[in-house]
Image: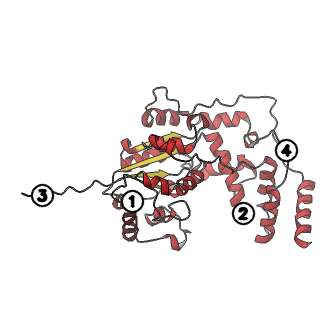
């Protein structure tokens, strides 16, 4: 009698293309935190290719990186694959890999070769453009010294739209991945409170076919990176344009983050006129409809449910700090440094 041996199918790989400003960091931290519990249920959030909680080394080694990527992130794909497969057990049914750098407009050749023997799904979250642009501006203010754009979110948005028309082009991003892995393997989720209940992690797990696990896992902690007050962002934007030492700039930025404001009712959306926010969204309506119909199967063509802001003739922009106010903050910081 000839005994036949059947090779166990490879586990499905879920590639989280972490669109920036869609809770990616929080989700990665959560997956890392519960990785041991996930493994008990046949889901692997691997150590291979991971830097901190995200798989930056894996994405970089497959070509999804910029020229300034740290050299220690770059590995041989064959060695990386061997490391990944050493973590896969006979119980592993699904592998989750997450990196924001998969957003980069790079070749898929290495990625396709790396995962050629694995069934592959790609999941991406999208945020409505008025919220997305403002959040991207806030992040840029925190990170970019001597920015090339004019002060404020209008300057940032106009600069990015002219410099790189593909920046924030959701249709291009998703269709590009669909061409690489097949449209049937693309999972699109709107990043919106109403559509991510009870939390982002639950929505993610449900979207990748693991809804039965939600009740067995700890609840995702509420995000603690609350947006900075508008006054803090304005001061940081101003201080980032000063050519000074790293130590002084760090002290100025730290001081700005701690500034309190009397305008406690204002949030970052108040930095843009309602009419401008509406235009940012309306400019994308064809794309939203296409994505909703093509990738979510929504005949209504509605991707986001949150109502648009209402044009308000009484809206007043938040004034930027005066020269005197900025000078006082600088003096306060210098006195602390010299005290």
Task: Give the residue displayed 48% in from the left and 54% down from the top.
Answer: 37
Residue labelled with disc 1: 111
Labelled pair 4, 2 in contact (Cβ < 8 Å): no
Rendered position, 25 above or below 198: below
Residue 106 percent across, percent down from the top left: 45, 58
Pick the residue in front: 210 or 251: 210
How many angstroms separate mark 4 from mark 2 (CA)?
22 Å
Residue labelled with disc 4: 319
**Mark whose residue sits in front, 3 or 4:** 3
How many angstroms separate mark 3 from mark 4 (CA)?
80 Å
Q: Under tag 4, what secondary structure?
A: loop
**Mark whose residue sits in front, 1 or 2:** 1
Is 116 left or right of 251, judged from the image as shown?
left
Residue labelled with disc 2: 145
How many angstroms separate mark 1 from mark 2 (CA)?
33 Å
Pick the residue in front: 165 or 34: 34
Q: Under tag 3, what secondary structure?
A: loop
Would residue 267 be seen by someone viewing this image from the given angle? yes
- The tag earlier along the polypeptide, 4 or 2, is 2
Residue 71 percent across, percent down from the top left: 52, 73
């Amino acid at each position: 009698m000839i005994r036949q041996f059947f090779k166990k199918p490879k586990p499905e790989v879920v590639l989280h293309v972490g669109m920036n400003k869609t809770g990616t960091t929080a989700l990665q931290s959560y997956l890392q935190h519960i990785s041991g519990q996930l493994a008990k249920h046949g889901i692997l959030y691997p150590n291979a290719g991971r830097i901190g909680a995200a798989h930056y080394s894996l994405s970089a080694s497959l070509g999804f990186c910029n020229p300034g990527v740290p050299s220690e992130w770059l590995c041989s794909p064959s060695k990386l694959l061997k490391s990944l497969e050493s973590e896969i057990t006979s119980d592993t049914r699904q592998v989750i890999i997450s990196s924001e750098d998969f957003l980069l407009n790079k070749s898929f050749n290495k990625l396709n070769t790396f995962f050629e023997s694995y069934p592959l799904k790609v999941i991406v979250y999208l945020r409505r453009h008025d919220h997305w642009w403002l959040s991207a501006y806030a992040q840029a203010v925190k990170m970019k010294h001597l920015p090339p754009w004019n002060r404020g979110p209008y300057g940032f948005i106009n600069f990015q739209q002219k410099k790189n028309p593909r920046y924030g082009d959701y249709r291009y991003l998703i269709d590009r991945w669909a061409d690489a892995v097949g449209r049937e393997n693309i999972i699109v989720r709107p990043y919106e409170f109403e559509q991510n209940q009870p939390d982002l992690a639950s929505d993610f797990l449900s979207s990748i076919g693991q809804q039965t696990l939600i009740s067995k896992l700890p609840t995702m902690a509420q995000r603690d990176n609350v947006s900075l007050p508008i006054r803090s962002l304005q001061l940081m934007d101003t201080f980032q344009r000063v050519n000074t030492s790293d130590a002084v700039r760090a002290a100025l930025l730290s001081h700005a983050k701690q500034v309190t404001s009397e305008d406690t009712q204002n949030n970052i959306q108040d930095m843009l006129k309602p009419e401008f926010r509406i235009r940012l969204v309306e400019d994308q309506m064809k794309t939203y409809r296409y994505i909703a119909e093509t990738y979510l199967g929504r005949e209504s063509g509605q991707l986001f449910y949150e109502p648009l802001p209402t044009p308000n003739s009484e809206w007043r922009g938040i004034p930027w700090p005066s020269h005197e106010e900025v000078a006082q903050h600088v003096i306060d910081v210098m006195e602390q440094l010299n005290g």
